[in-house]
Image (spheres, helix red, strand yellow):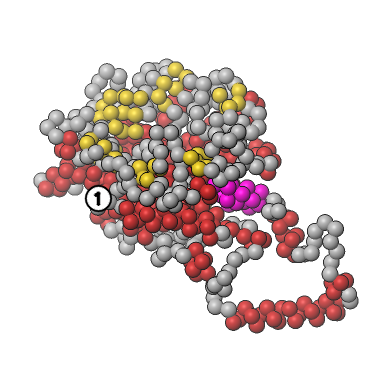
Amino acid sequence: MLPTTSSSLTQRRRMPWASAGTSAPSWARKRPRVVAVVGLATLLLFYLLASRAPAERAPEDWEPELEDRFKPPPPPVQPVGANKPQPKLSSAERQLWHGRAKRVRDAFLHAYHGYEKYATWPEDELKPLGNRGERNFNAWGVTVVDSISTMVLMDTKPELERAIEKVASMEFKQISNSHVPFFETVIRYLGGLLSAYALTNNTVFLARADDLGRKLLPVFNTKSGIPAYSVNTENGGIQDSGGRWGRSLIAEIGSCQLEYKYLAHLTGRKEYFRKVEHVMDLMAKGQQKNGLWHTEWSTDDGVQTNNHFSVAAEADSAYEYLLKQYLLSGKTEPRYLDMYLKSVNGVINNLLFLSPERKILYLSDLDASRFTGKFEHLACFFPGLLALGVEMLDETELPPEDRQMHLWAAEGLGHSCWLMYADQASGLGPELAGFRAWPEDWRKGRWMAHVDEWRRVGSPGGKPPGVGNLAPPVKNGANKDYDIRVGSYLSRPETMESMYVLWRVTGDKVWREHGWQMWEAIEAKTKTDSGFASVWGVESANPGKTDSQPRRAFYFLAETVKYAYLLSIDPAEDPWPSSHWIFNTEAHPLPVFKWKEWERDPFEIPN
């Protein structure tokens, strides 16, 4: 039986015999002098043994005891990045943003209380127009788990106490004989539980995380070891996604490492580390010459099966987790730095484009070496990722010229992602825009071709096209250089995330104001009597609402609201600086740690 409270764990450590119906050993009931002699002898023996043991190394057959597995989360290591000067804010600015932070907190409570009022546990989410709950994501109450780190951030103690009671009752059973999607379950449930444990030190969360981590492991039982799309947590059966038999997406296989590695660090279970590290071995071997990966992988032989390069849908968080794996383990896994830098340079050289008229910088994809022109909202995480690298990597890891290029790309893309909101009458960004190719040849639209030309002509100072002379918003009917292909706003967090990271890294107030402008549109256009809804028709000043928040988009409370709040609070009060905490792709903060020598051997951690 796993311990469920920190007090019970402490009690078991102090009194190993303390359990129901068991008395203390006879020697412990004898005279105090006898007990003292035995105690001193034990301490002496312990000292002699400890003095002979090599530092930070366990025996080769080391396997932690159950109680040792569930140790308190380690304190964050010393910062791995340089301290940055805080932006100077006037007292009026601080007061203004304090009020804005309160508005965001009120919005979170409005939506969460709506869920609590109308959804019956363990229903997953609220339908914000019909005011009823819905079991659409494993029926384990994902809104509760996904919201816990936001509750901690905003100090909503009553809601947190109610959430703990619900998490304590979770069993991860199946609905009928269904399967649970591995990727989404890991980033939301497992990541949420691990973060909750790190933030509260309540072992209820770690016990549930360990239970879930083990129940999901059969998903790796494919011929290649690449995880299947879904798994049955009761009988261990695995299943592919309809239409993708025998194949998984790179986002699905490359976005479980942060969660499982941190869980391995807490519990000592080697299988947690080795299963996900095997996938990284395949990714390291399969990284293309251009630094990228195709989006589909065979679960049979572990090779890439299509010819589609993208960093948006089907791929996004796999690229994100390269840098974050390196940072989360205190830079003790250097191969991920190399993989990250190759991939980022591949994206900048191959997937970053400039529009013909407004010179908007955007990310697109290549399908069978053909330009698609798609610019997805999902791709707007990338400027934040670039900025994080600029912030956390020193000059030995990221040379000055590359640092400047990454920062320029982050600034240009960040502006473009905000522009997708500011261009629309609703103030909300579309799910998918389509850019037009350059008239002569789409290859002329590659950003690096314009950067090379900018360098060749010897332009004095300034920033390259797409970064200098940023395009202003335009009104409806004016030339945008793009068409809206999917005009829905699905409460996605990626652009808000990048506004927050760019503000934190650069201290430029424009990013903070951009983020707040977006938040005001979200409040004005998506709020309902019980929550917040997805909308369609962002080109209109009054888009239509849909009865969803949206389906499988509980990330609104986990991410969008969280980033808006972090953007609003005083920078000096940010509780999760990236030198100490790394967000998983669902914005659940995990503490930075370092692998010990006695962990590296049994886990087979490569240097």
Q: Position of residue 396 (x, y in %)?
A: 32, 63
328 in magenta: no
Q: Considering the whole magenta stretch, tell me its main secondary structure.
A: helix
- For mark 1, give the secondary structure: loop
Decide if residue 200 is on the left or right side of residue 346: right
Is 35 drawn above or below residue 475 in the view shown?
Answer: below
- Say which quarter of the image contains residue 443: top left
Q: Nearer the viewer, residue 250 or 207?
A: 250
Is 334 drawn above or below residue 578 in the view shown?
Answer: below
Residue at position x 49%, y 32% from top?
Answer: 553
| Residue 410 in sight in this render | no
201 in magenta: yes
| Residue 222 in sight in this render | yes
Where is mark 1, residue-wise? 290
Q: Amino acid at mark 1?
A: Asn
Decide if residue 587 is on the left or right side of residue 447: right
Is 237 drawn above or below residue 80 in the view shown?
Answer: above
Residue at position x 23%, y 27% from top?
Answer: 481
Name, please, the residue furthest toward the left: 457
Magenta-tinted stretch = 198-216
